Image (cartoon, rainbow, N blue to C red):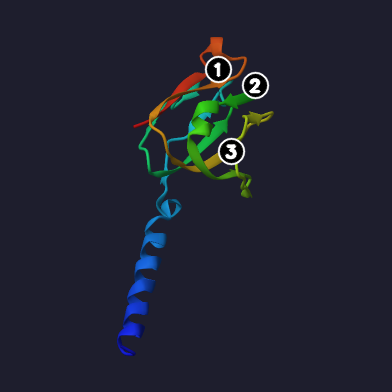
C-alpha cells in the first residue's frame, strides 16, 4: 500500500495540472485584421475591416485604430458583454478588470487593442456613436 500511494499522488497531480494548462486560451490568441476608423488622407468616415468574423471559444487580439481626425466613440455593448476580456492595451500599458467597458474613445489618432476570448455566438453590431449615418458601423460575428 505504501508503494501505491506515491504513484497515486503523482497520477492525481498530473490529472489536476493537465486541464489547467489546456484551458489557458490566451496563450494561443489570433491577431484579427485591424478595425481602422478614418484614414490619413483626410477621409474621416471610412472604415477598414468593418465586418469581422470570429469563432466561439478562441482567443483573439483586435486592434481598433483611429487614423481620422474625428472623435470616435466606439460602442459594442453586446459584444463586450459576451466576451471574456483578458486585457485592454493602450501604448503598451495594460488595463485588466472584471467587467466589460462601456465604450472606447479616441480623441486623437491612435490605437487600442483588446485581447479576449469569444464566448457567445451571435452577430454583434458596433458603432462610432454619432457617426452612424456616415457609415461608421459594422458587425463582429461570433460563430
Q: For the residues carrying marks 3 and 1, which lies nearer the camera in this image?
A: 3
Q: Tell me where residue 33 sits by quadrant.
A: top left
Dot 2 or dot 1, earlier in sequence:
1
Nearer to me, 112 or 75: 75
User: Are there few (<14), some (14-19), or many (20+) residues within 10 Å of tag 1?
Assistant: many
- Check the image and name the residue furthest to the bottom: 2
Q: Are marks 2 and 1 in contact (CB under 8 Å)?
A: yes
Q: CA distance from mark 3 to mark 1?
A: 18 Å
Q: How many marks?
A: 3
Q: Tell me where residue 56 sits by quadrant.
A: top left
Q: Element type at marker 2? A: loop
Q: Element type at marker 1? A: loop
Q: CA distance from mark 2 to mark 1?
A: 8 Å
Dot 2 or dot 3, earlier in sequence:
2
Q: For the residues carrying marks 2 and 3, which lies nearer the camera in this image?
A: 3
Residue in the picture at 34% in, 67% down: 15
User: Are there few (<14), some (14-19), or many (20+) residues within 10 Å of tag 2?
Assistant: some
Residue behind mark 2: 70
Residue behind mark 1: 45
Q: Element type at marker 3? A: strand
Instruction: Work out whether 80 lies above or below 5.
Output: above
Residue in the picture at 33% in, 78% down: 8
Q: CA distance from mark 2 to mark 3?
A: 16 Å
Image spot of residue 81 (x, y percent):
52, 33
- Check the image and name the residue furthest to the right: 107
Residue behind mark 3: 112
Instruction: Say left or right for 43 vs 1.
Output: right
Q: Are marks 2 and 3 in contact (CB under 8 Å)?
A: no
Amino acid at each position: 500500500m505504501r508503494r501505491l500511494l506515491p504513484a497515486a499522488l503523482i497520477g492525481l497531480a498530473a490529472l489536476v495540472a493537465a486541464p489547467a494548462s489546456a484551458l489557458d486560451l490566451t496563450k494561443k490568441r489570433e491577431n484579427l485584421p485591424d478595425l481602422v476608423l478614418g484614414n490619413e488622407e483626410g477621409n474621416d468616415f471610412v472604415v477598414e475591416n468593418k465586418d469581422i468574423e470570429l469563432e466561439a471559444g478562441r482567443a483573439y487580439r483586435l486592434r481598433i485604430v483611429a487614423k481620422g481626425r474625428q472623435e470616435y466613440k466606439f460602442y459594442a455593448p453586446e459584444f463586450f458583454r459576451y466576451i471574456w476580456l483578458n486585457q485592454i492595451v493602450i501604448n503598451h500599458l495594460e488595463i485588466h478588470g472584471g467587467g466589460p467597458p462601456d465604450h472606447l474613445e479616441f480623441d486623437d489618432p491612435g490605437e487600442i487593442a483588446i485581447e479576449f476570448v469569444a464566448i457567445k455566438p451571435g452577430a454583434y453590431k458596433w458603432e462610432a456613436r454619432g457617426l452612424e449615418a456616415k457609415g461608421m458601423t459594422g458587425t463582429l460575428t461570433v460563430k
